[in-house]
Amino acid sequence: MTSDKKDLSPKEVRKRTLRDVLILALVGILYYVVVRFMHLGMACYIHYLTGYYCPMCGSTRMIIELTKFNISKAFHYNPFMFISLPYVIYEVVYLFYICEAKKKAGKVNQVVLFIWTALLAIFGIVRNIVSL
């Protein structure tokens, strides 16, 4: 693979990663403001079309409750995402980093991400069986 750009220094990679994370955070804050104060949000089309909850259903409400420090209600909306939120944040930052550094994800990271995805799918199935 040839690239028109030369390899970036580690400092430049960190700066670009931080820039990307800040842009994503600003988009997230904007979405939060729209949902929280204007009561406009994205509907889950899987739930709308099938009547079943997708594994991510309740994540927006969970985040809103976390900002209010209502931990029990946040957990209730999506227990899996509540528990795995620190991992998801880490993974997003890591993926931004490896994209900027033009590196491949490590094998351990790939395995952990695969396991997390499988657990998310299992949660999506179980939550519809036992009505979590």
Image (spheres, grey):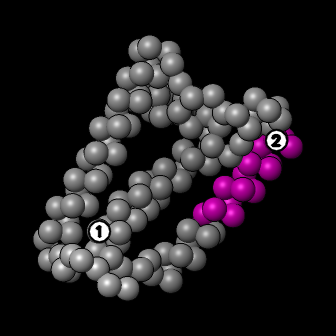
Q: Amino acid at mark 2?
A: Asn
Give whichever of 47, 62 is nearer the camera: 47
Residue at (38% x, 37% y) in the render: 28
- Tell me if residue 78 comes above or below residue 95 in the rendering: above
Residue 74 position by quadrant: top right
Instruction: Give the left or right position of residue 127, taking residue 27 as reference.
Output: right
Residue under circle 2?
Answer: 128
**Contact check, label 2 and label 1, Cβ < 8 Å:** no
Category of crowding for the residue at label 1, using alpha-carbon neighbours closer than 10 angstroms: few (below 14), some (14–19), many (at least 20): some
Instruction: Give the left or right position of residue 102, taking residue 63 as reference.
Output: left
Q: Residue 119: image x %, image y %?
A: 68, 60
Residue 17 position by quadrant: bottom left
Q: Which residue ends up furthest to the top in the rendered image?
A: 38
Residue under circle 1?
Answer: 100
Residue at (72% x, 56% y) in the render: 121
User: Residue 119 colored magenta?
Assistant: yes
Q: Quadrant of the N terminus?
A: bottom left
Residue at (41% x, 58% y) in the render: 92
Instruction: Give the left or right position of residue 10, taking residue 32 as reference.
Output: left
Q: Residue 97: image x %, image y %?
A: 31, 67
Q: Amino acid at mark 1?
A: Glu
Measure the C-alpha gap from mark 2 to mark 1. 39 Å
